[in-house]
Each structure stands twice: as C-alpha cells, then as structure tokens.
Amino acid sequence: MLKLSFTTLGCPGWTLRQIAENAAKMGYDAVDLRGLLEDVDISKRPEFTTGLNETKQLFADHGIAISGIAISARYAVVDAAEKEKHFNETRRNMELAAKLGAHILRVYGGSVPEGHTVDSIMPTVVENLRQIADEAEQYEITLALETHDDWCDPVNIRALQERVGDGFGVVWDFANAIRVTGKGIAEQFEGLKGSVLYCHVKDWTTDADGKSHYVPVGTGDAPVREVVRLLKANNLNVFLSFEHEKMWHPELPDPEEALPAYVKFMRSIL
C-alpha cells in the first residue's frame, strides 16, 4: 500500500504541534522530519531530547507516523575530520529515529570531491556507508541514499547497493534523477528495483529559456502517475513524501495551500 507523507521542509514556520495537527487534518499518513522551525538538524532540539516523550505522544494522539528522518550527512568524503562530522550527525539521528519508531534515515552521497570521478570515489563511499550501516543495524535503521547531487544515475546506485549490501537503500527522488540523467522512469526503476525505500515527490515546468519552476504536483511535467503505476504494479509498500521545499524557496505557496492540494491529487490517482 502506498501512503502519503510530507517533508517538514514544506512548513518551516510551523511548530511541532501544528505539524501533527495539520498532518492529521489534511489526510496524511505520516511526516518526514527534515528540520523544525529554524533548525535543519532536529536531533539537538528540545522537542527531540528532553521533550521526546511528549513528542511521541503528540504524534500518536493524532495517528501520524514518522516515515523517516532526513539529514544532511554525506558520504563521498575523504577528509577524516569531515567524515567524522557526517558520521556523528548520522549517529545522533539514527538513535533518534529508533526512539521515534522510524526505520529510515535519509543521507546523501554528495558531490564528488575535487580530483575524483564517481568511479574513483566509489570505494570510499562504499566503505563509509558500510561502516555506518553496520552501526545503524543495532538500531534497526536502514540508510536511504537520495538520488541527488552526483548520485542520480541508477547505475551508480545499483553499484552501491551491491557493494554495501544490507542496511542500505534509496530515496527515489525521480524528479532530480530525470533532470540530471535524462533517464526515463521505467529505466530508473529497473535500475533501482529492490532498493527503493520511499519516494520524494515534486513537480515542475520548464519555461522557454530552459529554467525550471516548481508547480503543484499533478500540474507539471513530472511523470507522477507513471511512478505510482510502477510502484503499485510491483506491490511496493512505501511512502510518497511530498518534498515542498518552502524552507529553501520561500516564494513557493504556503503549506496551508500546498499540502492539502498534494493529498487531493495523490488520493485521486491512488
């Protein structure tokens, strides 16, 4: 069964109570935690430290699950100090995810470091991911690498999956992957088959000068219906998380408008 979630990037001005209440009122199944108010990393906020029990009760009272936690940590890194910074962010959040009953932690590959190619950095990324995936296993957490930056091509994701093994999968941001690789949905999915843990959903149009603009899901060029058909045909039980990037793009519609519109469209095709 496909379920609906939204990333908290879409409501940067909402408190945690507003997030839980609106998620329930608007018809969502879950929330994808990516920041709260002014903080992108939620693991240090009081709502997720000293107030964690109250937070868990808040979401339980509203019947809203936590579909995952999304963090900024990336793993195409070679500098030891930088690597430790990303590992520590991951460790804090994998522990938090376990306490919240979420089993997926989104991470990045990140840009390929200067002087490297995807092929030459691949062993380092594999080593880094395998180490942190082993640590995540004790929390029953699976790392989900987003199709983002230099890691949009399903060929590269498949190579990582085969080498990292258990405890690793992918957040399929098919919009990113289309625009970066030019590969269609069927080709992407074939390469990612067996690795998709959940999807980020957004939509866009491209104007005459080639510039892309986000638009309400279902009104643009993103093949959302095709993605849903593929996921349903393969009996995947994943969240379709609306990535409304209001935090990064304040000109986008307010969450009071954008979030219910997503539910309305997605329910119509589910």
Image: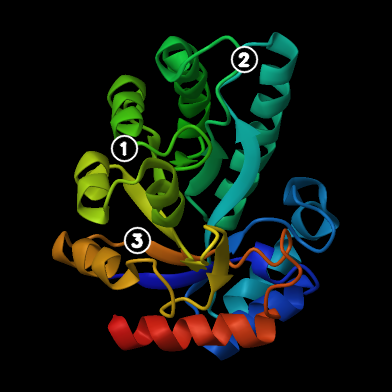
**Residue 53 % position (x, y):** 72, 62
* Element at label 2: loop
- Nearer to us of marks 1 and 3 is 1
Q: Quadrant of the N terminus?
A: bottom left
Of label 2 and label 3, which has the lower sequence position? 2
- Image disc number at residue 238: 3
Q: Quick check: 221 left or right of 229?
A: right
Q: Quadrant of residue 260?
A: bottom right
Are there few (<14), some (14-19), or many (20+) residues within 10 Å of tag 1? many
Closer to us: mark 1 or mark 2?
2
Task: Name the residue located 68 percent from the left edge and 75 percent from the top edge.
Answer: 19
Is residue 54 left or right of 128 when viewed as pictured?
right
- Residue 114 — which label? 2
Name the residue located 69 percent from the left edge and 10 percent from the top edge: 80
Distance Cα–Cα, label 1 vs label 3:
18 Å
Residue 27 in sight from this viewpoint? no
The quarter in which the C terminus is drawn is bottom left
Label 1 or label 3, whichever comes before in sequence order: 1
- Give percent across and percent down for residue 209: 55, 60
Q: Which residue is mark 1?
A: 154
